[in-house]
Image (spheres, rainbow, N blue to C red):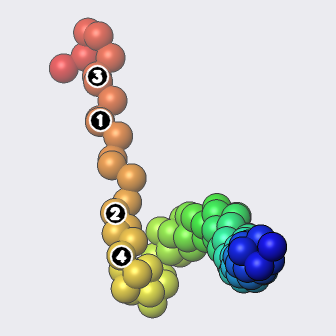
């Protein structure tokens, strides 16, 4: 009878330890899930802002070329945007029969 009580007490302690370990793992997983969720939101927002950023740079580059604004060209060059005007079109060929 004593051996049975000792065995049952040992199993109860083991179950209690496992329950505590399970609770600790659950709390750890929840904090990791919150962290991952925040990172996913940051990445999604960054992707949206990247599209907007490209559009703003394209408009600024177009404006710098149209107005020949030196300061704007320097600003864009400072962030790695190389502005070279559109290549000149090839001269029109002469009409047939003219020299």
Residue 48 screen position, x and y as percent: 70, 64
Q: Judging from the image, what secondary structure is the residue with disc 3 in?
A: loop
Q: Is residue 20 something that shows in the picture?
A: yes
In space, the residues marked 3 and 4 are separated at their CA atoms by 41 Å
Q: Earlier in the sequence, mark 2 or mark 3?
A: 2
Q: Is residue 5 above or below residue 89?
A: below
In space, the residues marked 2 and 3 are separated at their CA atoms by 28 Å
Residue 71 screen position, x and y as percent: 45, 90
Task: Quadrant for residue 55, please give it.
Answer: bottom right
Residue placed furthest toward the bottom: 71
Q: Residue tagged by mark 2? A: 84
Q: In front here: 31 or 60?
A: 31
Tag 2–tag 1 contact (CB < 8 Å): no
Q: Earlier in the sequence, mark 3 or mark 4?
A: 4
User: Residue at (81%, 73%) from the top-left corner?
Assistant: 1
Residue 87 screen position, x and y as percent: 33, 49
User: Residue at (64%, 68%) from the top-left corner?
Assistant: 43
User: Would you call the spot at circle 1 few (<14 residues within 10 Å), some (14-19), or many (20 or more)?
Assistant: few
Q: Is label 3 or label 4 in front?
A: 4
In space, the residues marked 4 and 1 are separated at their CA atoms by 32 Å
Q: Residue tagged by mark 1? A: 91
Left or right: 59 with respect to 95? right
Q: Is label 4 or label 1 in front?
A: 4
Tag 3–tag 1 contact (CB < 8 Å): no
Q: Judging from the image, what secondary structure is the residue with disc 4 in?
A: loop
Left or right: 67 with respect to 28? left
Q: Is label 4 or label 2 in front?
A: 4
């Amino acid at each position: 009878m004593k051996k049975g009580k000792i065995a049952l007490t040992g199993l109860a302690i083991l179950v209690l330890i496992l329950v505590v370990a399970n609770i600790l793992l659950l709390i750890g997983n929840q904090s990791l899930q919150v962290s991952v969720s925040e990172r996913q939101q940051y990445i999604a927002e960054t992707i949206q802002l990247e599209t907007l950023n490209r559009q703003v740079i394209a408009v600024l580059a177009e404006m710098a070329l149209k107005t020949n604004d030196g300061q704007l060209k320097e600003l864009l060059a400072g962030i790695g945007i190389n502005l070279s005007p559109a290549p000149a079109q090839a001269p029109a060929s002469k009409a047939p029969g003219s020299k």
